[in-house]
Image (cartoon, rainbow, N blue to C red):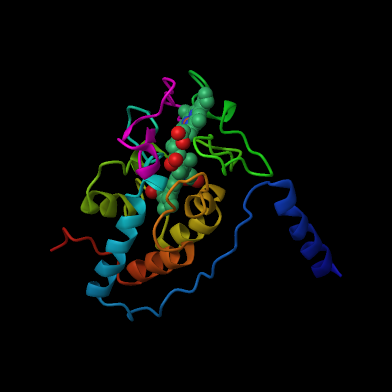
Amino acid sequence: MKKLVLAAAMAVLPAIGFGAEGETVTIDPPAEGSVSREDGLLAWARIYEVTSHPRCSNCHVGEDNFPMWSGPSYGKARRHGMNINAGESRIGAEYVPCATCHAWREEGGNDAPHMAPQVAMNWQLAPVEAAWFGKSSAEICNQLRDPERNGDRTYLDIAGHLDHDLILHWAWTPGGGREPAPYSLQEHVNDVLAWGVAGMPCENDE
Ligand code: HEC
Ligand code: HEC
């Protein structure tokens, strides 16, 4: 009986759009010791293609707090129009809050070009420590394996986070003529797991 109630509650969750729906991918790490450093670095190279892609890096920007408009649908890369500045709050609290335009709408709001993506309650810039825009493969690699700068996450936590974040589901199905992030969410999660099991190698290691 308990089980049934839980299942019913979970079925309702996505409809009201709270929290951590997701759970759309399988988190199944390879066995310890089964991924060589070389294969770990190959997995990293694919992870870098994703993390440096505009659907990710436009929000993963540095301490100037300017979201970016970049990628094929924007032409030349530039700062977010309309003088948007996320401030130190990273949500625009000091100026115009991101949610003014990036509200959450159940029916989406992303199919027409040049609409503000409306896919999550908490549309905001990623933390400054996770700045990826314009960064090299080695720079992002070292950030992502550093607990001081990655939100104190193990590679398993990172893989779980990837599935639990609505913004990430959007990045692979953005609509509105935007180019999706490369590979798929499942392939990206698999790469994070393989890179983790290989010991999170970066190309600048000895
Ligand atoms: C709308 C802005 C936005 C976009 C787009 C975005 N992120 Fe993020 N990202 C965030 C925020 C906010 C956090 C902090 C959330 C937290 O720590 O719970 C975050 C944190 C992360 C983290 C946690 C580890 C760390 O270093 O902080 C990972 C991994 C991540 N994002 C991956 C991605 C990937 C991969 C993409 C593209 C497929 C992406 N993000 C696109 C806003 C964004
Ligand atoms: C006045 C309305 C408005 C506000 C406020 C606003 N945005 Fe936007 N944002 C837009 C519009 C419109 C687009 C889409 C532009 C296009 O596709 O040509 C957009 C696009 C973006 C993109 C690019 C998404 C992609 O990869 O294509 C990011 C990142 C972004 N906004 C972040 C933010 C953040 C962070 C804030 C708060 C600090 C914010 N925006 C506040 C209207 C707004």
Q: Tell me if residue 199 comes above or below residue 12 in the rendering.
A: below
The quadrant of the image that shows the C terminus is bottom left
Task: Tell whether position 201 is magenta.
Answer: no
Along the line of sight, the residue nearer the viewer: 132 or 154 = 132
The residue at 77%/55% (across/down) is 12
The residue at 42%/46% (across/down) is 55
Along the line of sight, the residue nearer the viewer: 112 or 42 = 112
Q: In this figure, what is the number of numbered marks?
A: 0
Q: Tell me if residue 192 comes above or below residue 129 in the rendering.
A: below
Along the line of sight, the residue nearer the viewer: 72 or 56 = 72
Q: Which residue lies furthest to the left in this view?
A: 206
Q: Where is residue 2 in the image (x, y as percent from the top left)?
A: 83, 67
- Viewed as shown, does residue 36 lie left or right of 53? left
Q: Tell me if residue 99 comes above or below residue 154 in the rendering.
A: above
Q: Tell me if residue 86 comes above or below residue 126 in the rendering.
A: above
Q: Report the magenta residues as a range.
A: 68-91
Q: Position of residue 7 (x, y in %)?
A: 77, 65
* Quarter of the figure with residue 190: bottom left
**Residue 172 seen by the camera:** yes
The residue at 48%/18% (across/down) is 95
The quadrant of the image that shows the N terminus is bottom right
Task: Tell whether position 72 is magenta.
Answer: yes
Q: Where is residue 94 in the image (x, y as percent from the top left)?
A: 48, 18
Question: What main secondary structure does the magenta stretch of the protein show?
Answer: loop
The residue at 45%/46% (across/down) is 178
* Quarter of the figure with residue 145: bottom left
Q: Where is residue 132 in the image (x, y as percent from the top left)?
A: 31, 44
**Residue 91 seen by the camera:** no
